[in-house]
């Protein structure tokens, strides 16, 4: 699939009308105003001098963005293909205008209330209706509802949205500040000075301004649906299912129905409950006299509720609740919400190791296994709901049970959370603050954020997947340790105090209060990482969560350093890798590739394009010098897989001290080098296959440190299990040197000691560079788990030809692969074919066979011809790869 074909998939996010009745006579009429609009560069904008052709009206799509509209009109090159980024920065400096006309039917014109609703405007926008300005918006994350009764006509209403460049608008104000507050990533393109960054001053996705895994495309646009809503009776504004008490015996709930009447009247609010099996029943009703926005509480009791559990701990049954508001016996509006019933607690108790940090769901302490998610594209409306779900399904397939929705992007659409609910993926939800500092000393800025928080909490609070709201990403540690606070204090102590006091007001009080008011009991955390002690230290092992970046970042320690860090909860750590060659070719074309070629450098955002130097540092430290670019890509993937596997298993083996491991990162915003385990196309890197093994509910961790191997048995099951642990030693050519089996017991929810052996006990004089130790855990009903221990760096081992033999089934969809000698880090690649094996990135022991099912539409002949198999021996031998 080409870049342009992938980009052409489902560009819109439609507003679901199922939650509201659409009844022009009695109910709320919803008229979508999405679809075909027109847009242009504002003729009087400074950028028009060099881009005069863009001032002509052209077709636009809503929801959408300026960049995607320009691309659809063939006015710019594909922002992801090649290296066009520098030449597209003018778009973010320009002002843009969107318009459309619409008619209004007679029933809507006669209605007592008419509201225009903008679910998302990015970002600084003036909205005009029939020549009258009706809104000035300044927050991409808010919903804007504008009363327009009496301003509409039957035919030819004109709606215009004028977007102002956030950079051009804010830069003079920022430059006028005697002392600047810290931003995030400076622009390499000169569109704003390095000492006057504007991103932190506007409520817009921070990653649009560039990050170390994505480009700088400061876009604008109507990125969420637009509707005209009309009604005569009462509109249901919100339905919250507050879970007051949930256990195995009963669920005590409160349905909070907020109605917005068009006229003072007597209303009846009625609630229906639809159980997970589809059974519908009346759940209660209330009478109310309402003249303005009114909240009605209806108590609900469910005996023996079907409770929602994270992936691996139980099922994910979902209840649906439907509210109706009636006037004079007629239904004026209907509104539905879905939720799962569960009890969630962020438990923080003092113990011998400090203070715990663990999520407890329905009384079960859950070890959080997962990754950090970032936006799914640089342009938010573009990925389809199905594409988002496929990524989350891949997370579940890798045995994850938690995603941290990172704070430098945007609050994901409902489809993300619907999928998380259904798949049992807990969500740690950041508020959208990705780094640096904000002008939180400004009461107007804080008030804008508080309104945003109310909007988002009310939209998302019924999702059972959300288990935490977090104020921001890395801002506390940036102020305390990265020089932000120290440098500003040295320059202007009074202003520095004002900045920090405002920050604490916003993140320790204002947002905490909103979460307490709106979330229905979900915990709040002020920053990540933090110990929830703003006067004390953060990013520490004994309390709160950690972001550990001294491996890869900072001093760039070898990944074995992970074994020395045992936090209460690891919410960020990571190693970078390139995606597979098929993905690289999608943006690079057929040109020759090298680690320093222009197109490769353009898609490597770490260290301003020099990230391949860091990658090479880690590759050569463990594996040696790659012979060519293809080997470089493969070895980056192996390195990432090996390092993150080591860290995640160490975290799991440290239970209950450590109770979470979320690596950075799950997905990508575009095709390029990053820390992701799934690339922008949805293709798995070796890391995601490995995650399925190291996050398995029952697994073995065999970790070697300082000449000693510790074997730990891991179980997330809630009941005790019995199994067998088999210890073997092989030489690389296949000779079995040792074989011992012991019966083992795995307590519930535990990391229990299996074996501790130093090298002398294991090797008994055998050549360390020609030996591998394997530890296989077999438990009835669970996939087999294996730990592998090598006694030397991969670059110091003389890897033999593994002697791989392949055998295809008659239907051409099943492959049997056998290794004559040890075959480490096997990778199966089918070139340009859409073909995916049931497993990949695995190691075969001498004489071992694996049977794989290959999914895809290619013919057997095509599959067999395209298959290329690579192992570590191919990349580290003296014979060039056949790739």
Image (cartoon, rainbow, N blue to C red):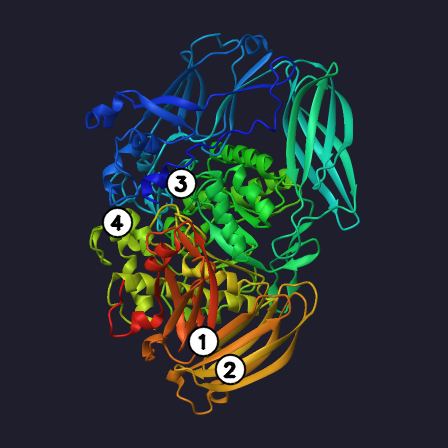
Q: Earlier in the sequence, mark 1 or mark 2?
A: 2
In this picture, is 525 found above or below 149? below
Element class at badge 1: loop
Question: Which residue is identified by label 3?
Answer: 200
Label 1: few (<14), some or many (≥20) within 10 Å? many
Q: Earlier in the sequence, mark 1 or mark 4?
A: 4
Locate residue 450 relative to residue 348 in the image: left or right.
left
**Can residue 293 be seen in this snapshot?**
no
Element class at badge 3: helix
In this picture, is 321 found above or below 343? above
Q: Earlier in the sequence, mark 3 or mark 1?
A: 3
Question: Which residue is identified by label 4?
Answer: 588
Question: Which residue is identified by label 1?
Answer: 845
Q: Check if mark 1's residue and mark 2's residue have beta carbons within 8 Å.
A: yes
Q: CA distance from mark 3 to mark 2?
A: 56 Å
Q: CA distance from mark 1 to mark 4?
A: 37 Å
Q: Earlier in the sequence, mark 3 or mark 4?
A: 3
Q: CA distance from mark 1 to mark 2?
A: 11 Å
Element class at badge 2: strand
Q: Residue 7 appears in which quarter of the rendering?
A: top left
Residue 728's mark? 2
Q: How far across and how far down the image is residue 674, in percent?
A: 37, 54
């Amino acid at each position: 699939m080409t870049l342009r074909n992938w980009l052409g998939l489902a560009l819109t996010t439609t507003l679901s009308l199922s939650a509201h009745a659409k009844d022009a006579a009695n109910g709320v009429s919803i008229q979508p105003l999405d679809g075909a609009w027109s847009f242009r560069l504002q003729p009087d904008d400074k950028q028009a001098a060099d881009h005069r052709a863009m001032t002509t009206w052209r077709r636009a799509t809503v929801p959408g963005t300026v960049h995607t509209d320009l691309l659809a009109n063939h006015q710019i090159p594909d922002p992801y293909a090649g290296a066009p980024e520098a030449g597209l920065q003018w778009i973010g400096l320009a002002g843009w205008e969107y318009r459309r006309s619409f008619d209004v039917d007679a029933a809507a014109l006669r209605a007592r209330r008419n509201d225009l609703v903008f679910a998302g405007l990015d970002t600084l926008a003036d909205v005009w209706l029939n020549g009258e300005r009706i809104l000035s918006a300044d927050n991409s994350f808010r919903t804007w509802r504008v009363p327009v009764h009496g301003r509409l006509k039957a035919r030819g209403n004109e709606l215009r949205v004028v977007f102002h460049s956030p950079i051009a608008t804010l830069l003079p104000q920022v430059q006028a500040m005697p002392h600047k507050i810290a931003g995030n990533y400076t622009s390499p393109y000169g569109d704003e000075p390095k000492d006057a960054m504007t991103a932190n001053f506007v409520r817009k996705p921070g990653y649009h301004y560039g990050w170390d895994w994505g480009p700088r495309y400061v876009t604008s646009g109507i990125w969420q649906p637009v509707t005209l809503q009309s009604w005569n009776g009462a509109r249901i504004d919100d339905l919250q299912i507050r879970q007051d008490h949930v256990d195995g015996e009963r669920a005590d709930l409160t349905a909070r129905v907020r109605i917005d009447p068009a006229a003072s009247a007597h209303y009846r609010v009625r609630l229906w409950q639809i159980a997970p099996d589809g059974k519908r029943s009346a759940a209660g009703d209330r009478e109310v006299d309402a003249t303005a926005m009114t909240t009605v509480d209806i108590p609900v009791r469910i005996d023996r509720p079907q409770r929602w559990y994270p992936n691996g701990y139980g099922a994910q049954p979902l209840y649906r609740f439907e509210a109706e508001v009636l006037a004079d016996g007629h239904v004026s509006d209907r509104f539905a919400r879905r939720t799962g019933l569960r009890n969630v607690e962020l438990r923080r108790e003092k113990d011998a190791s400090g203070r715990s940090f663990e999520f407890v769901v329905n009384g079960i302490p859950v070890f959080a296994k997962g990754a950090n998610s970032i936006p799914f594209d640089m342009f938010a409306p573009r990925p389809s709901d199905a594409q988002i779900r496929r990524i989350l399904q891949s997370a579940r397939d890798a045995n994850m049970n938690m995603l941290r929705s990172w704070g430098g992007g945007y609050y994901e659409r409902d489809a993300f959370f619907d999928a998380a609910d259904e798949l049992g993926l807990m969500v740690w939800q950041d508020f959208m603050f990705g780094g640096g500092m904000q002008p939180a000393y400004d009461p107007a800025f804080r008030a804008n954020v508080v309104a945003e928080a109310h909007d988002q909490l009310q939209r998302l609070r019924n999702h059972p997947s959300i288990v935490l709201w977090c104020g921001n990403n890395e801002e506390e540690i940036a102020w305390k340790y990265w020089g932000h606070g120290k440098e500003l204090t040295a320059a202007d102590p009074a202003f520095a105090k004002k900045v920090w006091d405002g920050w604490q007001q916003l993140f320790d009080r204002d947002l905490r209060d909103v979460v307490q008011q709106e979330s229905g009991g979900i915990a709040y955390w002020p920053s990540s990482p933090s110990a929830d002690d703003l006067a004390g230290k953060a990013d520490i092992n004994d309390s709160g969560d950690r972001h550990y970046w001294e491996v890869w970042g900072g001093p760039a320690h070898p990944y074995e350093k992970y074994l020395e860090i045992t936090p209460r909860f690891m919410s960020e750590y990571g190693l970078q890798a390139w995606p597979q060659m098929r993905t690289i070719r999608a943006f690079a074309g057929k040109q020759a590739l090298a680690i320093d070629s222009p197109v490769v450098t353009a898609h490597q955002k770490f260290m301003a394009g020099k990230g391949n130097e860091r990658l090479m540092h880690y590759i050569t430290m463990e594996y040696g010098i790659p012979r060519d670019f293809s080997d470089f890509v493969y070895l980056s993937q192996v390195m990432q897989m090996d390092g993150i596997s080591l860290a995640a298993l160490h975290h799991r083996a440290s239970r209950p001290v450590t109770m979470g491991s979320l690596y950075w990162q799950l997905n990508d915003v575009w095709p390029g080098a990053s820390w992701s385990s799934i690339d922008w196309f949805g293709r798995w890197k070796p890391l995601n296959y490995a995650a399925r093994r190291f996050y398995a509910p029952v697994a073995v961790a065999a970790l070697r440190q300082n000449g000693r191997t510790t074997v730990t048995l891991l179980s997330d099951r809630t009941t005790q299990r019995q199994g067998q642990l088999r210890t073997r030693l092989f030489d690389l050519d296949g000779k079995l040197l040792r074989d011992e089996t012991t019966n083992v017991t795995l307590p519930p929810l535990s990391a229990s000691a299996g074996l501790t052996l130093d090298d002398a006990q294991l090797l008994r004089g055998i050549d360390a560079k020609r030996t591998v130790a394997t530890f296989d855990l077999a438990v009835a009903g669970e996939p087999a788990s294996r730990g592998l221990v090598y006694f030397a760096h991969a670059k110091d081992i003389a890897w033999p030809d593994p002697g791989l033999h392949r055998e295809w089934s008659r239907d051409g969809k099943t492959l049997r692969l056998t290794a004559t000698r040890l075959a480490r880090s096997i990778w199966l690649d089918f070139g340009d074919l859409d073909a995916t094996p049931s497993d990949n990135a695995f190691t075969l022991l001498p004489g071992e066979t694996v049977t794989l099912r290959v999914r895809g539409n290619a013919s057997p002949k095509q599959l067999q011809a395209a298959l290329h198999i690579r192992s570590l021996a191919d990349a580290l031998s003296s014979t060039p790869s056949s790739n």
